[in-house]
Structures are given as structure tokens and as C-alpha cells.
Image (cartoon, rainbow, N blue to C red):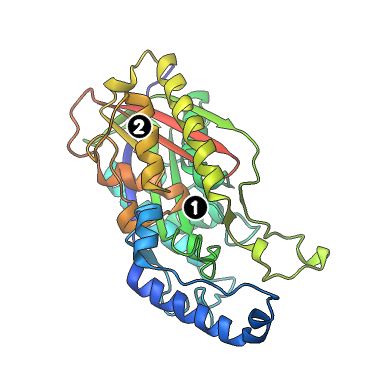
Amino acid sequence: MSAVVISGTGLYQPPHTITNAELVQAFNAYVDLQNAQNAAQIEAGEREPLAHSSVEFIEKASGIKQRYVMDKSGVLDPHRMYPRFTPRADDELSLMAEIAVDACHKAMAAAGKKPEDIDAVICGASNMQRAYPAVAVEIQQALGINGYAFDMNVACSTATFAMEQAVNALRAGSAKCVLVVNPEITSAHQEWRDRDCHFIFGDVATASVVELAETATSADQWEVLGTKLATQFSNNIRNNFGFMNRCEDTDPNARDKTFRQEGRKVFKEVVPIAAAHIESHLAALSVEPTAVRRYWLHQANQSMNQLVVKRLIGGEAGADVAPLILDEYANTSSAGVVIAFHKHHADMAKGDVGVLCSFGAGYSVGSVVIRKR
């Protein structure tokens, strides 16, 4: 088979930062307002009072210290508690496409690619801004790329799943260079009013150029040794927002219309699934887990990542082996694994092997094993 490489990545970072202290202050103000509003029911025992959050709780539960967002004021308004975006006309570039294009320009520059060099665009994210036309096609037009484009969604695993689709297209001959982009405006589906998850997500966009080795010209090339995908149905991470909601006559603002999860169940079930997935993928490639120079894992939970790597290498792994960007960016769904690679691969030497692995709702797990050329 023709050799395929990742030859460039790009990162768009939103302009606003929300620290845990800021988030807790807004959340606790919201809690106080709700408890005061429902004081009679609480007093009568008809409902439980909402509990305050804390910086200590957030950092112990996740390892997150801050997050980047597209809008800060709406999220921190205790009377609103979600972003405030300005509608755009149909002939204007959508917000999701705008941040995607920024990341794409950076990835293309890193790979030394012009629009005419790219044959396809795959846009993958946990939520799309609209059903159609595809956001990927809008991005394609904004970049001046010919060929084809499509959207896809496998929640937090979308980046690795999209990379396999890119690799398959390259090896099948339907493209020579594919742009994979992951614009994640997760602040829009985050439930900022739920203590158990109000701190989890942040916004970002990443892009990766995946191409045939024979066309690659960048100094930073990573050969794809193999890709592996797996899914297993679970309701433990779910979002019921969709186009049929109005037909069901349900409340569009109901709790199930935003992100929700059974965190403890997810932790208990996903860690062994992810570790076994990576182990079997490496075995198929005759690579020992201890021979992997670096693991770029999905950025959802610090303890989860540490335990996955511990199962693989049989001991504790520091930030050099499994770097975390979670503390700065929070969970950015599909983009997290690409951010980790983007920011933590420059020190690796020719021949070093690394693993990108994402895992999330579905359950879905995707891994891409790469080697520095």
C-alpha cells in the first residue's frame, strides 16, 4: 500500500478564557437564584436544593483549570448560563466554518499545501451547526478547494475516525491529499447549570493534512502505520437534541437536550475498552506498548488517561509519555487528541512511534499509530 503521512496540523484558539474561579462564581450565583426562587418547594420537601460547586471539586474530578470559549458573557451570566451568539445571514460564513477555516489555513501552511493541492475536506465534530448544507462543503468553498467534502459525527472520536476515512480515500486512489478539520463549539451543547458537568467543555478547532507520502514536502511528516476503529452502544453519554424534537412536542430546553453523562459508569467502562483497543492495535502492528514514545489520548479526564496508559505500560506514566492539555483547554471533544499531538510532538526523533487515541460517546474508540519520518 502507498505510504500515508500526517504532514501538518493547525489550531484555532478562541479569544476568551474562563477560569475555574470565574465559572464557580457564576454557577454558585445561579444556584442561589434558583434556590431562592424555589424556596417554598424546598422547604416543603418537594424538591432538593441545588448544591454549590468549587474550584477544588472541579480540579479533583477532572484536572481542568480553565477553558477557552467563543463567548464568555453569556456563560457567566447567572440568569442565562449559556453562550450568546449573533445570528448570521445565509450568505455569511457560519461561525463553525469560520473557526474551521482558521485552523485549516494553519495546517495547510504547516504542510506547505495550497488549495489546489487538496482533494477532499472531512469536517468532524460532536455537533454540527446545521443539518445542511454540510459545513464541510462551506469550508471547502471558503478555502477555494475543488473535489468533495462531507460532515461526520462520532462524538469525541470523530477526529481519529475521520483520519481513517482520509487514509482509506488516499489508499483507494480517490484523493492524494485530504484535509481533516474538527471545529468544536462545545460550549453550545454543554449544560452549564449542572454541577456534575458544568466545567467539562471548552471551544476550539483543529485541522490535519493527511496525504500520500509521495506528495508530502513538509519537514514534519508522520507515517500512518495503521488505524483501528470500534464502537459499542451505550447510553451513558447522550444528547437528545435533534430535528425531531419539535415533532415530539418536547421542551427544547429540557435537560436531555444538552450533554449529559453517567460519569462514574463511563470511567469504569471506557478505561478497559480504550486500553484493550490500543493494546490489540499495537499487537497487530508488532509494536510493544512500552516501545511507544508518546500517547496522545482523548482529553476528557486526567485520571482516566493516566489509568489507560498505566494498563498499557504496566506503571505510572508522566506528561512526557502521555501529555495533557486538559488543564488549559478542558474537554474539546474530537479536537482534544489533535491538540495534544499539535502541541507535544516537536521533541520526538526520527523513528519514534506514537499513538493518537480518542474515546467517547457511542461508545466509540479510534486509534492512529504513527511514526516520525
- Out of 88 and 271, give the one closest to the viewer: 271
**Residue at image mark 1:** 140
Position of residue 362 measured from the top left corner of the image (x, y, whole percent):
60, 41
Which comes sooner in the sequence, label 1 or label 2? 1
The quarter of the displayed image where residue 130 is located:
bottom right
Q: Which residue of the protein is positioned furthest toward the top in this rendering?
A: 286
Locate the N terminus by quadrant: top left
The quarter of the displayed image where residue 269 is located:
top right
Residue drawn at 37 percent across, 12 percent down: 286
Position of residue 332 measured from the top left corner of the image (x, y, whole percent):
43, 54
Q: Is residue 226 left or right of residue 237?
A: left
**Residue at image mark 2:** 309
Q: Which residue of the protein is positioned furthest toward the front in this rendering?
A: 44
| Relative to 158, residue 331 above or below | below
Is mark 1 in CB contact (under 8 Å) with mark 2?
A: no
Residue drawn at 64 percent across, 82 percent down: 43
Position of residue 126 measured from the top left corner of the image (x, y, whole percent):
54, 52
| Relative to 273, residue 334 above or below | below
| Relative to 146, residue 81 above or below | below
- From this viewpoint, is residue 279 visible? yes
The residue type indicated by label 2 comes to Val
The quarter of the displayed image where residue 128 is located:
bottom right
Crowd class of label 2 (few under 14; some 14 to 19; many from 20; radius 10 Å): many
Residue drawn at 53 percent across, 24 percent down: 172
Residue drawn at 30 percent across, 46 percent down: 324
Q: Is residue 159 left or right of residue 16?
A: right
The residue type indicated by label 1 comes to Gln
**In what element is the residue under mark 1?**
helix
